[in-house]
């Protein structure tokens, strides 16, 4: 049995379906996972409870991006106890962007929902996104009500946000809030190339440029309960800065309208 780590959100509540004739939302759910041994088990269990109470048509995938043995052991237990959860394992680490691209490729339903495997967002707030997922919306984008991270991460995160917002001309409040509900058919119109965390800037730029319809929803953000961020260290920040410049050159300066049709 997994250790169960649960945090009650102020806005987390469950919709009980009263109209049996209403079509069920169809959602592929996936979580990128890298050494998230302390949270991924409880996330899997909470996700199953949430989707069953919401009454949606779903599939669930965990994308492991070359984690350590401790995490792989937890994933093996998840696969044994919950055979409906699909687990995809990368033989080696392909980066955050690589994990997201694998998750998007594995999706089969009308909508795709993903968030990170470190449980800094409350899976139960998927309900808030579903409430906005109407026929005139292609992306329901979360934004953090308040970021609960160490001060240096908050400062660096805000600087990164404004650089991306201005450089790429993005009209969203929180480009890097990885709590998203996305219409899967959007990916018929563009491809993603980034392997790092810059994939969020690339994806949002292509969604905005493609004229896809975006609505935004406030969601809660929590302190990391286990492990540490793979993003906030000096060497990685230098690497991300270089990748961001390369992405900006490719998608803004040198872009010639060559998206996938």
Image (spheres, rainbow, N blue to C red):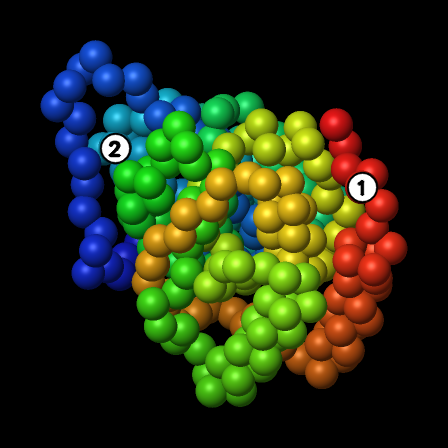
Across the whole image, how many numbered discs are drawn on residues? 2
Vertical relation: 130 (above or below) 234: above
Choose top left, top right, bottom left or bottom right for residue 170: bottom right
Q: Work out which quarter of the rendered image holds the N terminus and state it.
A: top left
Asked whether residue 70 is in view, the answer is: no
Residue under label 1? 257
Q: Residue at x 58, y 27 (%)?
A: 185
Sequence-wise first label, 2 or 1: 2
Q: Residue at x 69, y 53 (%)?
A: 202
Pointer 1 local density, CA inside 10 Å: few below 14, some 14–19, many at least 20: few
Vertical relation: 238 (above or below) 74: below
**Whole-Å distance between the Cαs marked 2 and 1?**
40 Å
Residue under label 2? 54
Secondary structure of residue under mark 1: loop
The residue positioned farthest toward the top in the image shown: 21
Residue 152 spot, x, y in % from top left:
53, 87
Q: Residue at x 33, y 40 (%)?
A: 132
Residue situated in front as seen by the camera: 188 or 37: 188
Q: Work out which quarter of the rendered image holds the C terminus and state it.
A: top right
Left or right of residue 151, residue 2 in this image:
left
Q: Residue at x 71, y 83 (%)?
A: 234
Pointer 2 local density, CA inside 10 Å: few below 14, some 14–19, many at least 20: many
The residue positioned farthest toward the bottom in the image shown: 151
Residue 139 spot, x, y in % from top left:
48, 42
Residue situated in front as seen by the camera: 124 or 183: 183
């Amino acid at each position: 049995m997994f250790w169960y780590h649960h945090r009650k959100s102020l806005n987390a509540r469950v919709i009980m379906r009263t109209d049996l004739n209403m079509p069920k939302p169809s959602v592929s759910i996936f979580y990128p996972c890298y050494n998230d041994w302390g949270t991924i088990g409880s996330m899997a269990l909470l996700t199953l409870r949430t989707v069953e109470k919401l009454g949606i048509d779903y599939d669930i995938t965990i994308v492991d991006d070359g984690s350590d043995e401790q995490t792989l052991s937890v994933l093996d237990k998840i696969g044994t106890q919950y055979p409906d959860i699909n687990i995809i394992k990368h033989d080696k680490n392909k980066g955050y962007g690589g994990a997201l691209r694998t998750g998007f490729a594995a999706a089969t339903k009308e909508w795709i929902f993903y968030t990170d495997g470190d449980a800094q967002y409350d899976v139960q707030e998927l309900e808030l996104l579903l409430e906005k997922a109407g026929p005139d919306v292609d992306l329901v984008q979360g934004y953090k009500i308040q970021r609960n991270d160490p001060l240096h991460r908050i400062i660096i995160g805000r600087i990164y946000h404004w650089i991306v917002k201005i450089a790429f001309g993005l009209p969203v409040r929180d480009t890097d809030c990885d709590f998203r509900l996305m219409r899967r058919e959007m990916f018929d119109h563009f491809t993603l190339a980034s392997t790092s965390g810059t994939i969020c800037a690339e994806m949002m730029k292509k969604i905005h440029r493609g004229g896809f319809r975006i609505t935004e929803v406030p969601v809660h953000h929590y302190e990391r309960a286990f492990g540490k961020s793979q993003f906030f260290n000096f060497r990685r920040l230098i690497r991300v800065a270089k990748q961001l410049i390369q992405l900006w050159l490719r998608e803004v300066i040198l872009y010639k309208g060559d998206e996938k049709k």
